[in-house]
Amino acid sequence: MNRKLSFSVDDESTDIIKRYEQFLSGSATGYFDVEELENIVEYYLRKGRTKECKKALEIGMQLHPQSSALKIKRAKTYLVTGDDLKAIRLLDMLTETNDYEVVLLRIEALIRLERNKEAQTLCNHLISEESTDLDNVCLDIAFVYLAQNETDIAFEWLLKGDKLNNKNVDLLFELAFCYEQDDEDELAIETYNRIIDVDSYLGEAWFNLGQVYFSLQEFPKALEAYDFALTIDETDSLTCLQKAHVLFQLDKFELAIESYQEYAKMTTDKWQTLLFIAECHEKLEQFDKSISYYKQSLESHPINYEALTGIGVCLLEEEKFTESITYILDALALRAEAPDAWVYLAEAYIGLDDTDKALEAYLKSISFEPEQPDTLMAIANIHLEKEEYDKAVEFYLSAQTLDGELEYVDLFIAVAYFKTDNVADAIPYLKKAVLENENAASLFLELCPDAIDTISLAK
């Protein structure tokens, strides 16, 4: 049995596709042999254009009614469109039962029909043939199982192929993919390194290695891998973008800006890249530059929540609270349930000493995302300032439940309890606050000057 790999068809400029489409439009006449029609069908299958596949097969069967090759393509089309029973019936009728492509299609059809033992028997038959190419046979079988999301079985066939030839790069890529699917990141890294050992100029291997390291937050190693990929192909836009992202994660914001700008040269849709650059300048506290890039992004893409909130935050940092509120409200008009934007709005109102509106915004935020310890602490602080001590206690306790490491949270719980005349409840928190911070006792007395006796009990 000869192994027959899938057809490969060039892009839409391919002469055969042009000639066929001219023929369909009536602007040209002509004749298509079987091989040409096979290529036409494969082209449309790869594009997912199954109607055109069926049309080409219809024409093909009229021209070549006895062609087994076109019948095989029809069976493949049935599988693509989910007509599994039609596919297996047609394959069973074919006389070329030992044709490599036919066997693979039968395996696929049997898996889809849950006739798994029969599928396994055919797989075993394929690798029982005498061939020097059995590692690639295992790879083709694995592809069939991967297409059906049968990753575990595909993995077994990949391991068999790897034992037959441990330098089959195509197989190693799929093996690494399976490891990633199973969250076996260290084994994926080992496999990508094996690929690189075979061919160190495979940029895809370096990129994928970088992606695994990125997912593990091992950013220096990810950066090294992306750099190797870009050394191989400096025009690889996706790698350039990922390098910029990893530089951002490493707090190397100036270098990240350079990489984002390089990426911007490679893409026509720049509004997201402008957001990334703006955020880098924001991290560098270069707020005017950041606002400039956010506004450029906004011009390119007006429905832009990220740009609006970005401008709002920068203006907040510059203490331009009224201007900040304008942009944050525009952002909320686009995304009314965004908890972060409501927090930014609250902080702007705090800047204007409008605690009532700030409290309203904070409460709106936690209505969408309740587990925000810092926001709960801010709400509690407002209630404390407004002398609403019972509510202050409630929110301080909620904040502490979510994050016991919040600065001064125990101190403020003690203050709020003391203000409600619950001295017994205040003392344990005050004791803890004093242990955590030597200044806690004096701060407590500043807020509760009549609490001298309570301080002595807490020591």
Image (spheres, rainbow, N blue to C red):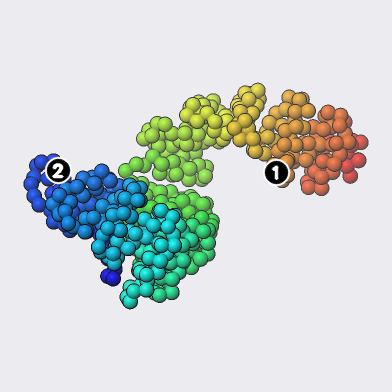
Left/right of residue 9 with respect to residue 320 in the rendered view: left
Q: Mark 1, residues whose alpha carbon is within 10 Å: few (<14), some, or many (≥20)?
A: some
Residue 262 visible in rendering: no
CA–CA distance between discs 2 and 1? 68 Å
What is the total number of numbered labels drawn onto the structure image? 2
Amino acid carrying label 2: it is Leu
Left/right of residue 283 with respect to residue 235 in the rendered view: right
Residue 437 visible in rendering: yes
> Residue drawn at (44%, 55%), measured in percent from left and top?
114
Q: Nearer the viewer, residue 438 or 183?
A: 183
Image location of residue 348, percent across then percent down: 58, 29
> Residue drawn at (17%, 51%), measured in percent from left and top?
61
Left/right of residue 137 with respect to residue 444 in the rendered view: left
Image location of residue 235, percent across then percent down: 32, 56
If the image is split into quadrants, where does the N terminus sit? bottom left
Q: Mark 2, residues whose alpha carbon is within 10 Å: few (<14), some, or many (≥20)?
A: few
Q: Earlier in the sequence, mark 2 or mark 1?
A: 2
Amino acid carrying label 1: it is Asp
Which one is closest to the eye, mark 2 or mark 1?
Answer: 2
The residue to which callout 2 is attached is 24
Q: Nearer the viewer, residue 93 or 225?
A: 93
Reply above or below: 120 against 81. Answer: below
Q: Nearer the viewer, residue 457 or 65?
A: 65
Image location of residue 356, percent across then percent down: 65, 23
Image mark for residue 403: 1
> Residue drawn at (7%, 46%), measured in percent from left and top?
29
If the image is split into quadrants, where does the C terminus sit? top right
Q: Nearer the viewer, residue 122 or 298?
A: 122
> Residue drawn at (38%, 34%), measured in percent from left and top?
301
